[in-house]
Amino acid sequence: MSTLIIFAIVAVLLFLMIWFFDVRPKKRGESKQTVSKLKNFKLKILSVGLVVIYAFRLFSVDVIRECISLVPTDALAGFSPAGLALITILRIFTNVAVILAMMAPWYKLQFLKNLTAFFVTATYVANVFVFNWHILSFVGVQTASTLNWRTIQFALECILVLLIGGMHLYDKICDKNFAGFGKQIVVMLLSIVAMCFAVLPPESMQTLFGLPDLVANDFEFFHRIVIYATFGVPVAIYFATKNKEYALRDFVLTFLSICAFVTFFSLYGSDFTVSNVPLHLCHTAIILMLISFVFKSKKFFYFNYFINVIGALIAVLIPDVTSTFFEPGTLQFWYNHMYAVFLPILGVALKIFPRPNLKMMKNAVIVFSAYYVFAAVVNTWFANFDPGVDYFFMRGDHVLEFFAFAFPLKYNYIYTFDFAGLVWTIYPVYWLALYIGFVLFTFAEWLVYASLYKVFDDWGLLYRKAKMQKMDMLNLKKEMNGRDITQPLSPQGANMIKITNFSKKYGGSDRYAVKDFNLQVNAGEVFGFIGHNGAGKSTTIKSLVGIQSITQGKMEICGFDVEKQPLQAKLNVGYVSDNHAVYEKLTGREYINYVADLYLVSKTDRQQRMQKYVEMFGLQDFIDNEIKSYSHGMKQKIVVISSLIHNPKVWILDEPLTGLDPTSAWQIKECMKQHAKEGNIVFFSSHVIEVVEKICDRIAIINGGQLKGVYDLDQLKKQGQSVEQLYLSFADKATKKFNFAKEG
């Protein structure tokens, strides 16, 4: 009988391969691409057919599930222990192979094509050779001797899988592309091992190893191992696939969702009762995850993401199972809940689905509310037929074992009534408390998710920055050509600020805030940088001091490249920002000492300089008071002192005199003059023309993000031109241009 079936399979297979895949070009001009699309379309048809055929086997009873420790039962008479071990292991490979065959036509992945061509084909060739053993393991000795529907089903399955696998093997041979095939084999072997564990038939461990006394509960050793696996496996999957192409990440998660479905429902044919209809939340999750990943359904996915994960996690931590771990039902329980925990999380982490927002979470709670009411009705209804019905712990006491205080909520408020010839028993207070508790858990879960997003974003940013800094350091060493990296990259610029072709864009804007800006400021100068509000002054300064990135161009301070040598560049800069932000709970002295520590200023130098500037600015009576008690001018003076505490070669001030009284403004101007006389650079922005004319040696005018010119004040005076007239000439042009655009 088995020989005839095998011959029939081979004959049908050959006929179908000749007829079904006769896809040679039949018309002149028909391209290879058209032929390839036609062949792939036919493979997809086979894939859909395979899904239907395999579903019959998935929901069927297998007598091999009665076998323990490779001891044959009466139904398996004639099997030796070695034969049972072989067929059990082959069934594990077959689970993997049939899922790969279903998925292969839908993904353009070389990795999957290789697996389908070699592993899938080889597995089902082996299945054909031991076809009779498979039928015996399905239906037992007595039924296997006659033609039965399981024999027909498996024969059709073998034909369809071998057609799919055979065509992939044929394509592989025709391509003659075996470059790097040795490495691919290693990857395939490792993947096959992982896949076998992902879709392990629930009965296989019992068949191979029996029922050792291993129980995973009460946080004992074996239970902790399972918990670690629940969190460790997704982490391993994430790091193994996060940098791979989208198609591979999608394939991995879709494969796992199918595995979850197969491992859960493979026992239904032999153990279907009213109480295990998949209405329990974690059981529903298996179906919804399959739909989510196969059809990319966001609604089902986010319901799982917000509602099922927390329920499955609770089940993993406080499992409602006390039987031996290798029993099929127990193994099914753990696979079900582990998948329900990490598959939705991986779906977002691997960017198959976008990160959800709070609105999506609220929608998920609304859907859960409808589900909860439905589950309550079905619980009460089905309890008339099976007292063991307990969808979502509504009837049992499993949850109450961990929250003993809630027993009265259940048993002090029981209502029973007759309806439609059935007895309906409800626990309204307990059910309401359970619902509220779950919704609160869901909102808490959202807070955890939001926090984890922030953590991972920060880690990702730090990782990218560290990687970029490492590359920058390697490039810097190369540019230094053997010189110490603490030396200036451009020694000829040791006494100047040099800006070359600087441009800056913000975010995704197409508009440049500053465009092609070039400037050189020399030692001993007080250099004024003027322009109206929004002209680009602060943008240039913030890039120069390293607060924000440079879109294009180059900036150097004392020969140090601001981007490539940021630490050395900043050590030479004293910066006074336009908002004088300070730590207001510190005293003035504490804040100055804090900045001095950052710049590695010795105690002797800081004390001398602090005393000098405190006396200069008249802060003797306030220096030990908290900064929050200071006036605007006093805060500005503290910022000025802290910017000079390390005696910087370059002192940069952004609108330093805004809001100051005349005395404070005069003091800061005198300080700027003195610092330049000592051979340093003072670079400050302002739109107060009178100040610029009195203290500057040279000025630069910026308008609309572009440098309009650099001017020597002595030369302007000789020409009889004032800074105000010069500045207004550019401002008037900008105003006329704006008005013209507005009128147009």
Image: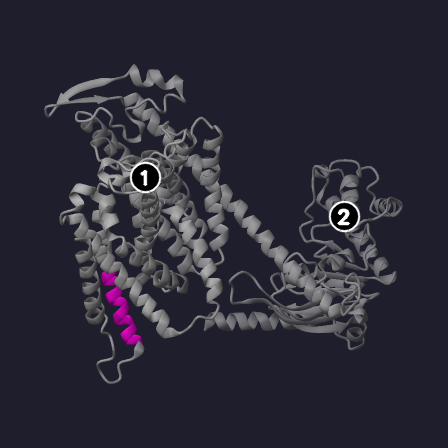
Indicate yes or no whether the magenta region holds residue 44.
yes
Side of 168 where 275 appears, left or right: left
Q: Which amino acid is tagged 1? A: Glu
Name the mark nearer the viewer: 2 or 1: 1
Q: How is the image coloured?
A: one colour
The magenta stretch is 33-47
Q: Main secondary structure of the magenta part?
A: helix
Residue at horizontal 42%, vertical 56%? 249
Q: Secondary structure at mark 1?
A: loop
Q: Is residue 32 visible?
A: yes
**In the image, farthest residue toward the left:** 421
Residue 203 marker: 1
Q: Residue at x 36, y 59 (%)?
A: 119
CA separation in Å, label 2 and label 1: 65 Å
In x, y percent, where is residue 268?
Answer: 24, 39
Number of other residues with Cα within 10 Å of mark 1, as a class: few under 14, some 14 to 19, many 20 or more:
many
Element carrying mark 2: helix
Would you name the residue on which mark 2 appears? 598
Q: Position of residue 682 (x, y in %)?
A: 79, 61
Horizontally, is 524 left or right of 20 in the view? right
Compared with 119, 16 (above or below) is below
